[in-house]
Amino acid sequence: MLTPSLEPHRDCPHCPRLAETRLALRAEQPDWWNAPVPALGDPGAPIAIVGLAPGRLGANRTGRAFTGDASGELLFATLEKFGLAEGGEPKGVVIYNAVRCLPPGNKPTPEEIRACRPFLAGQLRAPVTIALGQIAHQSAVKAMGGRLPKCRFAHLAEHRVPDGRILIDSYHCSRYNQNTGVLTAEMFEAVFARAVALRGV
C-alpha cells in the first residue's frame, strides 16, 4: 500500500487555482472524486508511468489514474497486452501524475507543476519509468535527480539519471494525439516493449 503521507491531502491548499476548481466541481458534481488523485498500483513495481494530470471526466471523476476516458482506454489495453494489468488493475506497474489535481483546460501552470513535484519525487522509485508527454518528462527528470539539458524529450528516447534509473519518453496517449495520428497504438506499444525489456536490467 502507498503511504498516505506521500499523497496530497484531499483539500491540499498548495495551488489556489486548482483548489478553486475542485470546490466548484464538488458543488456541481458531488458524486465525483474531485480531489487529488493518488498513485495507482504497486509502489514497489519495477515499472512506473508518469502522466500529466487527471482528466475531467476520467481520473477526476473516478479517483483512479487514467480511468474513465480515452487516454486510459489505450493505456490499459496496452498494459494488458504486456501483462502489466489484469481486469483493469495494474500488475507490476505503478501509475502517477505529475500534477495530482484537475487543471482547467488540462493545462497546469509551471507553479502548479513545481508545487506537486515533491509528491512525485517522494514516490518515484522504479528502475524504469515511462513519461507520457513533455510535461511529465520534465517533472520526472527533475524528480529523479536528472538534468533537463541532458534529457531532451522525444518519443522512445531513453535517459539514464545519475543513480542509474532509466526514463523512457512517449507521446501522451490523449484522445487528441490518437485522433491526429501523433501517437498510434503501435508507437505506444513500442515504448512498453522497451520498458519490459529493461525492467530486469
Image (cartoon, rainbow, N blue to C red):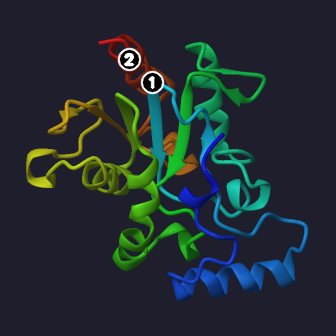
Please tell me in which quadrant of the rendered image residue 42 appears: top right
Image quadrant where one finds the N terminus: top right
Residue 128's disc is: none
Q: What residue is rendered at 71% in x and 54% in y?
A: 58
**Nearer the N terminus, badge 2 or badge 1?**
1
Rendered image: mark on residue 199: 2
| Rendering coords of residue 25 (x, y %) | 77, 79
Task: Tell me if residue 95 comes above or below residue 24 in the rendering.
Answer: above
Apparent side of residue 69 relative to residue 164 in the rendered image (left or right): right
Question: SS at mark 1?
Answer: loop
Q: Is residue 148 above or below residue 130?
A: below
Instruction: Identify residue type, mark 2.
Output: Arg
Q: Are marks 2 and 1 in contact (CB under 8 Å)?
A: yes
Q: Please tell me which residue is depicted at 79% across the width and 63% down the height of the picture.
A: 33
Q: Looking at the rendering, which quadrant does residue 60 occupy?
A: bottom right
Residue 112: percent from the left, percent from the top?
43, 75
- Residue drawn at (60%, 50%) of the image: 3
For label 2, the crowd category at 10 Å Cα-Cα, with few meaning under 14, some 14 to 19 and many 20 or more, is: some
Residue 36 image offset from top left, x and y in percent: 64, 65
Image-based side of 38 in relation to 62, left or right: left
Which residue has dot 1 on it?
Answer: 46
Give residue 192's position: percent from left, percent from top: 44, 22
| Image side of residue 92 versus residue 60, left or right | left
Q: Residue type at mark 1?
A: Pro
**For the residue carrying disc 1, how many other residues have a C-alpha within 10 Å: few (<14), some (14-19), or many (20+)?**
some
Count of picture labels: 2
The answer to whether 26 is drawn above or below residue 97 in the figure is below
Real-space CA distance between mark 2 and mark 1, rounded to the nearest whole angstrom: 6 Å
